[in-house]
């Protein structure tokens, strides 16, 4: 007997695969641009800093609309709110320097990592979620690292470029794994 969940697995996996590939490309381009702007806050880096969590808001909206059977809705709404608050926090604090930016980003990385873990664990039956589970765990650790780095002479925005790149790679690996589910059901 086929259930509603079974019949929706392929389109859900395909939608998430496409979203994850888009997130990979965005993260890679964003990381390169942030790296090129340098280690301190300037107009270009501030714009990039605010755009990243806003992109996460857009991705959460796409996720909510496209992943009908595999969505821990409450966690996705929490992620959406956290990312929106982070964009506002970065816009407000970016002018004060790298220290404040790393602290805001660190708190976001920790909380978003926890949410990512919750969502991925809830979707593990769909397939392709182990990279997301690992990414969520790494994000919480990286967030702690950003907060600790913020008070040191080594504080630099370029570390965020590395974080985005690693996160993007996890999205790509998950997309590749979801491709099998989208194809085979």
Image: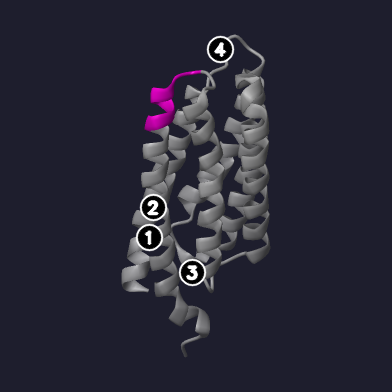
Picture residue at 55% right of the left edge, 61% below the top: 61
Picture residue at 39% right of the left edge, 73% below the top: 10
Q: Marks 3/4: CA distance?
A: 41 Å
Q: Marks 2/1: CA distance?
A: 6 Å
Q: Which residues are magenta?
A: 32-39
Give the vertical position of 94 relative to 79 (above or below).
Answer: above
Picture residue at 44% right of the left edge, 74% below the top: 9
Disc 3 element: helix
Question: 90 or 56, which lies in front?
Answer: 90
Colour scheme of the rendered structure = one colour
Packing grade of label 4 (10 A; few <14, some 14-19, many >=20) is few
Report if residue 114 is visible in the image: no
Q: Residue furthest bottom?
A: 1
Question: 9 or 107, which lies in front?
Answer: 107
* Quarter of the figure with residue 109: top right
Report if residue 64 is visible in the image: yes
| Quadrant including the C terminus | bottom left
Q: Badges 2 and 1: C-beta atoms under 8 Å apart?
A: yes
Image x and y of residue 49, in percent: 53, 34
Disc 4 element: loop
Circle 2 is placed at which residue position? 22
Q: Marks 3/2: CA distance?
A: 14 Å
């Amino acid at each position: 007997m086929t259930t509603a969940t079974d019949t929706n697995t392929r389109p859900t996996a395909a939608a998430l695969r496409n979203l994850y590939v888009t997130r990979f490309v965005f993260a890679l381009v964003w990381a390169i641009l942030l790296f090129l702007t340098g280690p301190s806050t300037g107009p270009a880096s501030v714009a990039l800093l605010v755009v990243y969590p806003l992109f996460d808001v857009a991705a959460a909206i796409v996720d909510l609309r496209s992943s009908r059977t595999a969505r821990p809705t409450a966690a996705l709404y929490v992620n959406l709110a956290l990312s929106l608050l982070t964009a506002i926090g970065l816009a407000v604090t970016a002018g004060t320097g790298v220290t404040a930016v790393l602290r805001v980003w660190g708190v976001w990385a920790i909380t978003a990592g926890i949410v990512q873990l919750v969502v991925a664990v809830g979707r593990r039956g769909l397939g392709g979620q182990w990279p997301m589970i690992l990414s969520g765990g790494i994000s919480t650790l990286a967030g702690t690292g950003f907060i600790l780095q913020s008070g040191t002479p080594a504080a630099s925005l370029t570390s965020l470029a590395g974080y985005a790149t690693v996160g993007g790679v996890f999205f790509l690996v998950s997309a590749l794994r979801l491709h099998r589910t989208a194809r085979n059901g």
